[in-house]
Amino acid sequence: MFPNVKQESISPKKQTQIATSLSVYTEEVSCDKAIALLSRFLPKCKFTQGDGNADITAKKSDSLSNTPEGYTLSIRDGKTFVEYFTYAGLRNAFATFSLIVTEKDGSLVVPDTEIKDFPVLAHRGMMLDLARGSVPMERLFDDMVLIAKSKFNVLHLHLSDTAGIAVELDCLPKECRIANYYTKKQIDEIVNFADVLGLEIIPEFDMPAHSEKLNALIPELSCQIEGKNTLWTVCAGTDAVYALYEKVIAEMLSLFPGGRYFHIGGDELDFLDIQPPLACHWDECVKCKKKMQEAGLADKRELYYYFINRINEYVKANGRQTVMWSDQIDCTRPAGLSKDILMHFWRVAEKGRGPYEGCSFQGQLDMGYKMINSYFPNAYVDVETYLDADNLSKWRWDIIPETREESRAQVVGSEICAWEYGNRKEFSFYDYSLPSAIVLAGDKLWSGLTETYTRDTEIWVTRVVLGEGTPKGFNVFDAIGNIYPPRSCETPCYLEKISAEKEDVKKIIAVLSEDTRFASGDKNRALAYQKCAEFALKHMQ
């Protein structure tokens, strides 16, 4: 019934109708915060503060201290009892509870249930790229709710890139900001909402590459060379660069308080394999060569390590741990980077983009780093050829790419990456493709299971995405052709794979278009699926 639950005892024959208004009592957690969370997970219900005899009672239990994100959930005769050790455990219990509540004959019902559950992976992240475009706050909030309901515990926000900065920073020129950037007030709302949802935010500011906009606006940050400067990287030999980044880091972390990490990017120093190339000019730059001589650095790679280590000290001075993409690590020479940096693997650099011969995921583990695995293409959801249902079902973060058993404990987690998430003009398919990616990947990172997705999985994903108003057995993917919809804005379904008859698709459209069935973000996702089904119906033979 619940794919990612470790232990469960469900009595589907014992169904109890519950009221749409439920009282809540929580121990050692603000009841207002718990109610705010439940109201987002179950938007068709109303929640009020109750006492020890409430409809939903949650109490802290020291017996769960060895699994701080774990919980127990018991439902008897419509009364719900939760035990947790941390707020994360309570969040996870409420996420499961939101899936147990179902619609039957226009009423909400729950089965008698006994569940004990906990994750197999500590770091379960979703990366949303906002640097190439922002999305309206409510749409972002809708996706954050689904991310939390799928039991992710990390929200990684990519906030700067070559096109500009997605947040308001006083230390940078206003012209650095992308259109419709997030104001400080909006960032504060995002941070507070993430706190309610039990999501730890990792903000990312890309450096030293992906810096064309920054270099163009502040010329003293760029390298001094003869000929054309591509402005791709900042100058590692200029003290003004480090002074500015020190301000950026301090201000960024003031906007995102309370987290453990700061992501500095650090990837893709060169794109020499494309025309025209995007180059890092450090081995040509007068200032960079002087810095290498002063610091006793042999080449551009050692200067890169110098740059990262210096930035790492700024991050640590602000009480955070540095995270960085690891594609610029050369596994054939001694590790030049501090071991307290958390490495974020996506792939070994391609020829012309960084060190590649003799480099591997295992090689980086052998250097002693702890790693987050976002293996490209298995963890990338933006392009259809990167990730599909088949390779997601089989992927494990600790064995792909190939990893020796004794090194697997160094892989602390994984993140699924939604690049171009904010670019809805060209990537509007995220409205209907991203929900499946969130739910399936969340289940994968929670349970660690490798399994074949079946029709029962499709029905379960439909229920998670569309909420408590979903009819029993309803499968929206009958009208789309696959549990993971296509990454296409032109053909939002697999026409050749749809086995449903036209009348069945019409019934699916009728359910999705019911005004009162879905609420909040569930309604918006139902509308996205409705457009897919209408496209299918129009083009079916």
Image (spheres, helix red, strand yellow):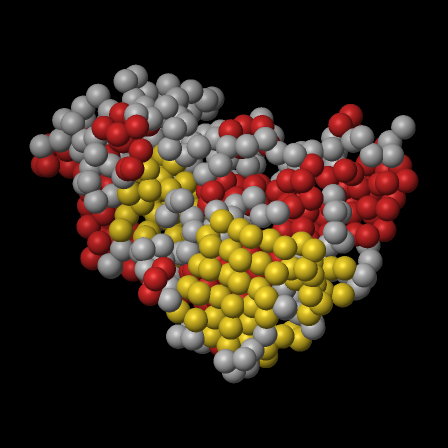
Residue depicted at 68% across the width and 47% down the height: 462
Q: Quadrant of the C terminus?
A: top right
Position in image of residue 478 (x %, y %) = 77, 38
Q: Nearer the viewer, residue 309 or 81?
A: 81
For this orientation, the residue located farthest to the top is: 357
Residue depicted at 74% across the width and 51% down the height: 472
Figure quadrant of residue 213: top left
- Residue 15 versus residue 420 in the image, above or below: below
For this orientation, the residue located farthest to the bottom is: 51
Residue depicted at 59% across the width and 70% down the height: 79
Position in image of residue 453 (x %, y %) = 62, 34
Position in image of residue 376 (x %, y %) = 45, 30
Figure quadrant of residue 325: top left
Figure disc tally: 0
Q: Nearer the viewer, residue 281 or 79?
A: 79
- Residue 498 versus residue 45 in the image, above or below: above
- Taking the image as shown, residue 132 lies to the left or right of residue 204, namely right
- Residue 360 versus residue 99 in the image, above or below: above
- Taking the image as shown, residue 194 lies to the left or right of residue 215, namely right
Q: Is residue 147 visible?
A: no
Q: Is residue 79 visible?
A: yes
Residue depicted at 80% across the width and 42% down the height: 533
Q: Nearer the viewer, residue 499 or 213?
A: 499
Position in image of residue 53 (x %, y %) = 54, 80
- Residue 313 versus residue 408 in the image, above or below: below
Q: Nearer the viewer, residue 351 or 12?
A: 12
- Taking the image as shown, residue 392 lies to the left or right of residue 253, namely right
